[in-house]
Every structure is written in structure tokens, then in C-alpha cells.
Amino acid sequence: MRTSEKNEKSVRHRSAFIFFSLITVLALAAPLLKAEAEETLPPVPKGPLLLTSVKPEQLNPGYWINRLEDPGRILKTPAELAEINEDVHFALSHCVDIFKMDGRKPGLAVRDQLELEYGAVKGRVLYDVQDERIPKSFFEEKIVPLVAIKTVPDRIPVKWGAAVRPTSVRALPTEVKMLEAKGDIEFDQLQFTLIKLWTPVGILHTSSDGKWYYIQAAYTRGWVKARDIALFDSRDQLRTYAKSPEFLVVTGESVPLYADPGLTGKIQQPSMGTILPLKSRSKTYYAVWIPERGGDGKALLTEAYLDLASDVSKGFPPYTQGNIIRQAFKLLGARYGWGGTYNGRDCSGFTQDVFLSMGVEMPRNAKDQVYVGTQLDHFEYKGDRARRLAVLKAATPGVTLFRMPKHQMLYLGEVNGRFYVIHSTWAERISMSSDEKNRINQVVVSDLDLNGRSYLGSLEERIISASEVR
């Protein structure tokens, strides 16, 4: 749906205000950006990595696509993909269609969820980035007043918003990192995930200081910084843009967005799977709508621009084996990032982005992704090898996911009796007697013998389920 002339005129009048607001926000954010920049992370091992039996030619998507009988055959129509998405909403209570969600939520359910998430963290032994244990008093004196559970009304009128930039979804309303072990800075236990630019959300609660919203998004709920969410007057107004029939989907790892048609002032770099409402197309650029947060928190819609050569698709690409594999390989070598931290993707974040870019509203967690499509089988840990091998041999490349405890992989195919996957992984365990690891920290291709030198067993031995996304 196109915006009215009145709205377009209003957008133009607000352009100057938005520009100066952006300057102010960047100035205020400078200390945070500086602090993040100063956090030293181990570098990502230089790729491309040749793991297990992988050969250089197998790092090319064409190698796997050319082995397929009919890689361009459409496996699902858009209408059939919509049915898959509906099934996910039915199967998983925390995965919802924001535009069908009840506009008034029972306060008791939200209070119970807040209590549950707080209780899951407060009793754990956790450390900060200075390797100091997080004291119990921090939760009692800092977190409890912010969460303000008692202020949640019995009936919550949901507010509607959209992310103005990628933003973290947290278990608690704090930016303090909480680590399971000293020095374990890449695994913040409060980090749920990262939602994308334009992600529509229902706002269920606000922290006592007004700086955090407790939100429900399509595939997650938790605390986000209020400054990253623009408020819409109604859900219908949000739907006009977030569900526009004319849209671009980011099909590259990321694409630059610019503030001007000359494509000189880069303002954001949305990641694979981001949906951008399309306004128009010229000979040199696409114009899209993006939300900004005004001084009162309200959404201000403004134009942003992409080069026509950007890795985007008008509408979703056809759902084929070949296209899915191409999408996966665009992320080869991309940084591992727990819950989307450090501009990276963890194992389920990788598979989620690949399938989001194809129109599948994939849940965020590996244990939930098995509910998408058809569940092929479940296995005992390190057991049922004959049955597991039978499933592996019958698996369909490009649409089959193999899940281990806490890990997810996308199947590529079988070569000379070896089964190959592409996945985002942090490390390979290499010892039968200790937790010694080789750091990988990126999206890689490997066969299922990876980790076979460790006491935990190979990837293949640890597969506990297989599912087919079609």
C-alpha cells in the first residue's frame, strides 16, 4: 500500500528534524560505541577453512547445486510457505503473528513470564567482563526496581512499534554482560537474539526508567532498548509498512542503506532476511521506507536508498534447493556471534537468516526450528546409528536440518559416503580427556566427522533430530 500524499508531505517537512535528531543520537551514543570498540575479541581464524575432508571446490555453492537433479524446481509456492508459517505459530506459543495477536493481553501471563526470566538468571553464578562475580545485590537493587513487575496491570493494552535498527533482545533490562565463566566474553547469558530493522513488535511493558520495553516479536520476546523502537499510532498503521505488498528482501549477508539518492551517506547495513518496504525505483537506486524514532518516541517515516546492484530481491526468491544453498554460501566465513552479538550469527541464527530470506518465518532457537516443515526422525544421543544413517542417506540437500544438542546444521549432500553440512560453529573439540578446542568462530562447510577426536563424539554421532523445511 502506498502512503498518501498528505503523509509524504509530512515526511518531507520532518526531514530536517530527523537529520538533527540523528546527529544528536550519534553524539549521545558515542561513549557506548567507544566502549564496544575497546572490547578486545579474539580474531576470527582466517578463512576459507578446510575442515575434515573438505576440498577447495566444495566451498563453492555451484559444487553442491550441480549435483542436484533439479535444483531450480519450486518446492513451495508463497501460499504454501504461508501455511508453514501458520503451522509454526500454532505449534509454538512464543512464535506469533504480530498482526493477529490479541490487542489486550492478560497481565498475569506477562507477570509470570517476567518472574520466570528473572528467576532463571538471578540464582546463577555469573561474571562480568572484568571477571568479577555478579553479586546478588545487583539483581535486588538494580534489576528488580527496573522490571517493576507489580506495576503490570491486569489487562495490558498492547502498544505497537518497529525496530529502527538491529537491536538486542535481552533476558533482563540491562546492558551488563553476564558470563558463565571468567573471560567468556563472547557468550553473554542475557542475550536472547537480535531483531532486525523494521521488525514489528507488540510492547507489553516498560521499565521503571522508561529506557527499556518488554516486547513480543514474531519469534522472540524479551527486553529491548526503547530508543531502538519507534511507536506507531495503531497496528494498522504499522501493518501498512511492515506488511507492504511491495518490498525488498535483503538476500546478501548485508546491504548498505544511504540517506541520499546519490548513495554517499551510509546510514545502516541491514542483514540477510531484512524486509524493506519499497517506495519506488529509479534508474540508479531503490527508495525504501525506514522508521525513525522521534523525540516523543513516535515513528517518523523517511526515505532511504539502495544501489540497484545491491544483493536484494523484489519479493522473496523462488523456494528452490538451489536458491537456499546459494543463500547459505553467501554467509560462508561470516563471524559466529552468540545471539547475534558482534554482528555475527550463531548456529540457529545462521539457519534462521537463510530461511527468512526465502520467506520462511523460522523460529530463533534450534530446538524450535524442528517444528518447521516435516520432522523426519528423532534419535538417541550417540545411539540408533543404523536408523540415523538411513535418514542421512535419504535426506534432501538444501532443505534438511540436522540438530544436535545446542547446535543446528544445514545439509548439503553426500560425497563418497561422507555427509556434508554448512553451519555456524564456534569451535571444534579435539581431546578425548579435556575440553581442548580449535577455535573456528565462523560459518563453515564440514563433513559430519568434525569433533570426532573428542570425548563428546562427532557431529554425526550427536545428531538427535532431522527435519525437512518443505
Image (cartoon, rainbow, N blue to C red):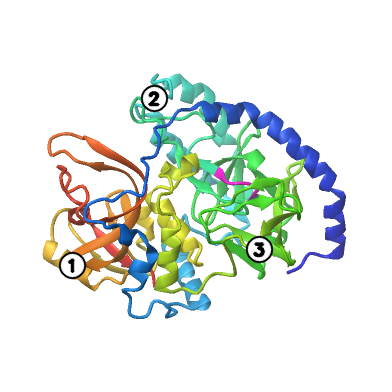
Residue at 31 percent of width and 61 percent of height: 58
The correct choice, above or below, for 306 with respect to 281 in the image is above
Residues in magenta?
Answer: 163-167
Query: Residue 455 vs residue 152: left or right?
Result: left
Pointer 1 residue:
416
Pointer 2 residue:
127
Q: Earlier in the sequence, mark 3 or mark 2?
A: 2
Residue type, mark 1 in image: Asn
How many other residues sit within 10 Å of disc 1, few (<14), some (14-19) or many (≥20)? Answer: few
User: Which quadrant, please, contains the N terminus?
Assistant: bottom right
Horizontal and vertical percent position of residue 17 = 83, 42
Q: CA distance from mark 3 to mark 2?
A: 47 Å
Pointer 3 residue:
308
| Residue 337 seen in the figure | yes
Horizontal and vertical percent position of residue 106 = 56, 51
Residue at 73 percent of width and 49 percent of height: 259
Q: CA distance from mark 1 to mark 3?
A: 42 Å
Cβ atoms under marks 1 and 2 closer than 8 Å: no
- Which quadrant would residue 416 be assigned to in this image? bottom left
Q: CA distance from mark 1 to mark 2?
A: 47 Å
Residue type, mark 2 in image: Tyr
How many other residues sit within 10 Å of disc 3, few (<14), some (14-19) or many (≥20)? Answer: some
Residue type, mark 3 in image: Leu
